[in-house]
Image (cartoon, rainbow, N blue to C red):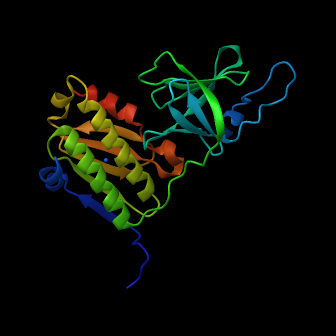
Amino acid sequence: MTDEPPAHFRAMFAAAALAAAAFASPAAAQQGIRLFDRPTDGRQFTVPPVARFVAEDGQQFVLDRSQGRPLLKFENSPEIWALQAQPGPRGDVIYKNDLGEPVLRATRLGGITVFTATRPSGSAAALAGQGSPLRLSQLGPQELFDRLAQASARASRAARHGILFDAEANPNSSALIADAATVASLAIVRISSRAEGRTLLLRLRRVFLTEGRRASVQMQHETLVITVAPGQGMAGRPSSERIVTVAANRR
């Protein structure tokens, strides 16, 4: 016997049982973009690579530019958004999600605007200090099983029927698979809050997570298939916004 995780394992969890019981940057630099520059004297603001911000509506978030892709996490959500930095007008930098929608804008003078569902036109944000890097930790089979169980329970409560969360993973992909399961359950909660949401979720009975060459999400009959690409880090799984869009537009 050994405590080492097997090279390949299949983690499965049937949400029906739970439902019955319970009805949960460097990237910019690579593109030649310098953030937070003063155009008058060339000096840079002392913004940490991982920084905390507070929006004018009180919402707090962390922007992590210390890794391959800018990452953003709101304090009131477990989801981490992998962003793409692109040059904007007047020297601004626009950070977009995996649907190409703006999430954050940084001006040459150091101003930050965050775009949310409650503030689609943008909310100014102020630097609040240094933050902690946004990273995923490697998970073992039992930890992955627990994360799938939590995601299944959350999704089943929102849909008011059992949703099976089922995954194929290995030690290298388990953390991203678990994170994708959490994000998928958040997307299902968001769908359920829409006027037509319960109708959209009637046929959803299973969420299957697997590994592939690139991140994707598809609806196949009663199954939501989510593919993650571990080599791309947190950018290697679809965001909740992308999952909601695919589920809402299924035929």
Instruction: Let me know if residue 221 appears in the view.
Output: no
Q: How many marks?
A: 0
Up-down: is 129 above or below 90? Answer: below
Up-down: is 165 above or below 126? Answer: below
In the depicted view, which residue is nearer to us: 162 or 204? 162
Task: Please tell me which residue is depicted at 68% across the width and 21% down the height of the picture.
Answer: 107
Rendering quarter of residue 49 = top right
Task: Please tell me which residue is depicted at 32% across the width and 31% down the height of the picture.
Answer: 244
Residue 177 placement (x, y as % from top left): 39, 52
In the depicted view, which residue is nearer to us: 138 or 100? 138
Residue 21 placement (x, y as % from top left): 14, 54
Instruction: Let me know if residue 213 appears in the view.
Output: yes
Q: In which quarter of the image is the N terminus?
A: bottom left
Position of residue 234 in the picture relative to residue 142 (left or right): right
Residue 185 placement (x, y as % from top left): 31, 43
Q: Which residue is outermost to the right?
A: 41
